[in-house]
Amino acid sequence: MLTEQVIHVVDDDLPFLAAIERTLRSTGLTVRGYTCARALLDEIDLNQPGCIVTDLRMPDMNGLELQQALDKRHCHLPIIFITGHGDATTAVIALKGGAMDFLTKPFSEKDLLNCVAQALQKNLIDRRLAGEQAVVRERYTNLTPREQQVFRLVVSDLPNKLIARQLKISPRTVEHHREHVMHKMQAHSATELLTMAMLCGIRELHL
Amino acid sequence: MDSKPSDKTLDYVDLFEHAPTGYAVLDGVGCIEKINHVGAALLGWQANWLVGQPFSRWLVNSDREPFIAHLRQLGSSAGGHSATLRIKNRQGRLLTLWLQSQVVMGQTNANTIIRTIMVDISGEQASARKLRSLQSQLAHLSRLNTAGELAASLAHELNQPLGTVVLNCDAALRLLGTDPYRTDEVMEVLSQAKSAATFASDIVRHLRSFLRDEDEQSSACEFSGLIKDVSVLIEAEAKDNDIELEIDIDPDLPPICADPVQIGQVLVNLAHNSIEAFNERTCTNKRVVIAVKRLPPDRIWVSVTDTGPGIHPHDIEQIFSPFYTTKNHGMGLGLSISRSIIEAHGGKLWATQGMLHGATVEFTLPTPPTSVGEPHAD
């Protein structure tokens, strides 16, 4: 698994791109620079952790379009947008699309490094969550259909008696399935089971 | 004698006295013989006091000569003669009077009389002056308005190099803080900051030459230089709107005789209109082409073409009327001012609908006669 975090920088203004790359490299970070959004889309490895720093206004494909293209490819690297001047409409669109942050030119090295550090931190957390989510999902798919039914009713806060009535089985059988669910999901308490359900959206998806 | 003629005379006296214009009878040397109420009121005195006074008494000093010339002219021509003269009345107010006079020759000089009507045109003169100043203010305002709308994209354009300056200066400071630091690295970073700063100042200089409101004299100027000045503004806006901008200049253009700021204003205006046209409707293939060509023998031809929604046939002449606009915002002055600027330069400006879509606004400008047919030496 790739672990090194890479910062992808996209800006059509060469001197500016060079300055950003220099600043980021000075702190020992790994940087890849691109002069247009297409180049990034062509070259980026979606499994590599990191973040993206991109200019909003570029010929060919602008920052917002890049954001949409990445979203389509299920790439969830945090994106920091660089803008020449604060434009509320664009900012709203970008933030709704999940933008991490905005940097308004001109900004200092400190501003840039702070932003990037936060983005990388967020990416770490995102990846850990995604990893946990994958594990939980995996365990969930290993449950029998009946166990999945019981799981969903348990995390909906229904007592065993009501679950039994709803599934038209005995409370004792419910108890039985429940033990299996706890075991297979590797949950030690009802609360932990609930957390898992929330984490991979089971509770919201099936309620 | 019955009373009827007398009534009629009274009617005429009344008509004379209260005619809606000043009326005076002067003698052969310009002294007042009779003057009606309105005329007397213009001078600020009672009519009976004015009789016998030389009319020139109320004229401002510099207009006494022209008044005498006016009287002389009457003697030599059978018809009437008119003059515009300024007087200072009893209350000290300056008035501009339009005089229309006719002479009635007598047997002797003493019998000669001059009939004069006097109309106060101070109001009209002031309105004409006011109109002129308003027009020039409007031209400036519309320039500022256009510039204001451009300022946002210009801010972006300026922040671009400034962003580079700040990051490079920060890097230089960081490098200098390390011990030992590498001189070549610091120098490289600083020279990059410098070139970015120079780039920013170029943008500002071009903008300034566009914005100043001076009565520039027309002078021989190169169109290519002029385009360079305004293209900074146009390019920034085009880029902001994802529009492809193409500037196509004939390499051997003769110099034109023009006020560069005004022609620059026209160009920015036309390009701005084209760019805005794309906002009215969603368009693909957004392109604006500015072409400049030589039009032998003595003109140059400039066209601004876009691939936008075009101009409605109903609007094609209307768009040149002041305050007529097809946009959701805007004053409707751009094209009317542009046309008057081009016409003042001896050129023509018109609009045409594109073959398939889009619109073209084009104008011609005369080139100074000396350069006709001669290759221009730089």
Image: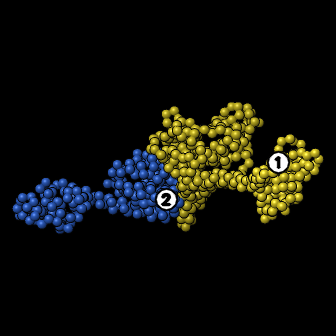
Chain colours: A blue, B yellow
Q: Chain of mark 2?
A: A
Residue A185's image quarter?
bottom left
- Quadrant of the frame with the C terminus of chain B: top right
Please state the horizontal and vertical placement of residue B371, each as a whole percent of the image: 74, 36
Q: Residue at x 59, y 43 (%)?
A: B320
Query: Which one is in front, B169 or B208?
Result: B208
Chain letter of disc 1 in the image: B
Taking the view exactly as shown, the residue that stands out farthest to the front is: B1
Q: Residues within 10 Å of mark 2 (few under 14, many from 20)?
A: some
**In this rendering, would B183 be left or right of B357?**
right
C-alpha distance separating marks 2 and 1:
70 Å
Which residue occupies 91% across, 49% down?
A: B111
Q: Position of residue A23 (x, y in %)?
A: 50, 59
Front in this rendered view, residue B203 or B272: B272
Which residue shows up at 66% across the image and 54% down it? B134
Secondary structure at numbered mark 1: strand
Answer left or right for B290 relative to A204.
right
Q: Does dot 2 land on a helix, a strand or a loop?
A: loop
**Foreground of the two, B336 or B58:** B58
Q: Is residue B297 visible?
A: yes
Taking A78 as reference, is B134 left or right?
Answer: right
- Which circle marks residue A143 in the picture? none
Q: Quick check: B338 left or right of B98?
A: left
**Residue type of the residue flagged with mark 2:** Gly
Reading the image, the residue beneath label 2 is: A86
Q: Amino acid at mark 1?
A: Ser
- Vertical order, B289 against B142 (above or below): above
Which residue bears the numbered disc 1? B101
Q: Nearer the viewer, mark 2 or mark 1?
A: 1
